[in-house]
Image: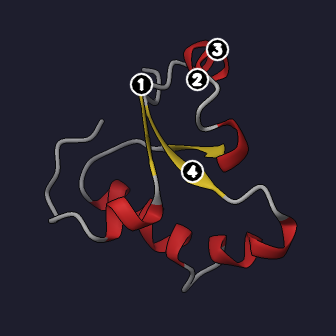
Amino acid sequence: APRTTALAVPADPAARSRCAPGGDVFEAFFRLTADGARPTTVLDTRAADHAHLTARGITEVVTSDQVLHHPRGGTRS
């Protein structure tokens, strides 16, 4: 099954530590997983690239802020 929800990750190498344990992107990815989603990731610089997202089967892009400030138990897939 395609992974339709993507979490935007920083393209800037200086911000990649956000993807490490304790970082907001890491925490958001595992929050999505705990809520039953099967997320993938997409670089933040490609998050608005409709052709890229469509080719990957992505229908929803979320940011770590959206995930971490959203009540648990969502219905993302």
Residue count near mark 4 (Cα–Cα under 10 Å), binned few <14, some 14–19, many ≥20: many
Q: Are marks 4 and 2 in contact (CB under 8 Å)?
A: no
Residue count near mark 2 (Cα–Cα under 10 Å), binned few <14, some 14–19, many ≥20: some
Q: Nearer the viewer, residue 35 or 51?
A: 51
Q: Which residue is mark 1?
A: 59
Amino acid under disc 3:
Ala
* Placement of 37 over or under 19, stated as above or below: above
**Colouring chosen for the image of the structure:** secondary structure
State the separation of the CA atoms marked 2 and 3: 6 Å
Drawn side of residue 26 relative to residue 46, left or right: left
Q: Earlier in the sequence, mark 4 or mark 1?
A: 4
Q: Are marks 3 and 1 in contact (CB under 8 Å)?
A: no
Q: Which residue is mark 4?
A: 8
Instruction: Tell me the element at label 1.
Output: loop
Q: Which residue is mark 2?
A: 53
Q: Earlier in the sequence, mark 1 or mark 2?
A: 2
State the separation of the CA atoms marked 4 and 1: 13 Å
Q: Earlier in the sequence, mark 3 or mark 4?
A: 4
Amino acid under disc 2:
Leu
Amino acid under disc 4:
Ala
Q: Nearer the viewer, residue 33 or 46?
A: 46
The reply to whether residue 31 is visible in this rendering is no
Q: To which quarter of the image does residue 4 belong?
A: top left
Residue count near mark 3 (Cα–Cα under 10 Å), binned few <14, some 14–19, many ≥20: few
Instruction: Tell me the element at label 3.
Output: helix
Q: Which residue is mark 3?
A: 51
Where residue 33 appears, x then y in whole percent? 36, 55
Q: Residue furthest bottom?
A: 22
State the separation of the CA atoms marked 4 and 2: 12 Å
Q: Earlier in the sequence, mark 4 or mark 2?
A: 4
